[in-house]
Image (cartoon, rainbow, N blue to C red):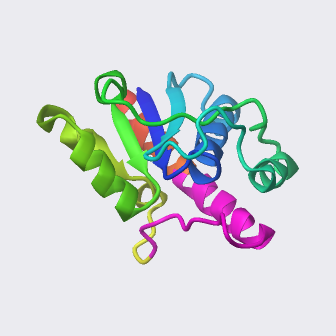
């Protein structure tokens, strides 16, 4: 299974999801074969490392994000990835706009994998304080665990 996490600039939410899924799969589902990446719908931060607040909050829980670099979603991603998981509805709409019709169903919201009935989006923490980054990490951990469970079920 190939999973691409997507947010706006690829320096906060989506790299957090990339690092968390990769590490949780390693720790909790070592037999699960998953390729994981992240990207942004905008080109604001291409080539940059994740936001330092993102990296600090993640590192406190054992997730290494410093080596990741932002990139923008490309049309080829719809061929390469089985799931393109958006952090919010605005980025989902942009993915659906970019997607070839045959692969439009690959673009989905990420947070429903957490099993929340009332929270559908991972909020953008960029303009807030570190508490917002911690909230993002917590939501992403829940979503990643739900996604791992779903991928295990599909793998049989």
Q: Is residue 156 visible?
A: no
Q: Which corner quadrant of the image does residue 3 belong to?
A: top left
Q: Which corner quadrant of the image does residue 22 belong to?
A: top right
> Who's the residue at 58% across and 36% down the image?
46
Q: Is residue 107 above or below residue 155?
A: below
In x, y percent, where is residue 115?
44, 63
Furthest residue toward left: 101
| In front of the other: 113 or 54 | 54
| In front of the other: 17 or 96 | 96
Q: Is residue 102 above or below residue 122?
A: above
Residue 45 within the magenta-colored segment of the rendering:
no
| In front of the other: 139 or 86 | 86
Question: What range of the chain is rendered magenta?
Answer: 119-143
> Who's the residue at 31% across and 52% down the image?
94
Q: Which corner quadrant of the image does residue 80 belong to?
A: top left
In x, y percent, where is residue 11?
64, 47
> Who's the residue at 26% across and 41% down the image?
98
What is the quadrant of the N terminus in the image? top left
């Amino acid at each position: 299974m190939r999973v691409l996490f997507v947010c706006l600039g690829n320096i906060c939410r989506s790299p957090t999801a990339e690092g968390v899924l990769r590490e949780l799969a390693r720790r909790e589902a070592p037999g699960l074969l998953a390729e994981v990446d992240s990207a942004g719908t905008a080109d604001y931060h291409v080539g940059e490392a994740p936001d330092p607040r993102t990296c600090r909050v993640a590192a406190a829980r054992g997730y290494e994000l410093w080596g990741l670099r932002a990139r923008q979603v490309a049309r080829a991603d719809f061929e390469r990835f089985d799931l393109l998981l958006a952090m919010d509805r605005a980025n989902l709409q942009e993915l659906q706009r970019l997607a070839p019709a045959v692969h439009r169903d690959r673009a989905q919201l990420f947070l429903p994998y957490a099993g929340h009935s009332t929270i559908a989006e991972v909020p953008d923490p960029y303009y807030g304080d570190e508490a917002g980054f911690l909230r993002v990490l917590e939501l992403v951990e829940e979503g990643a665990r739900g996604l791992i469970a779903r991928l295990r079920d599909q793998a049989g």
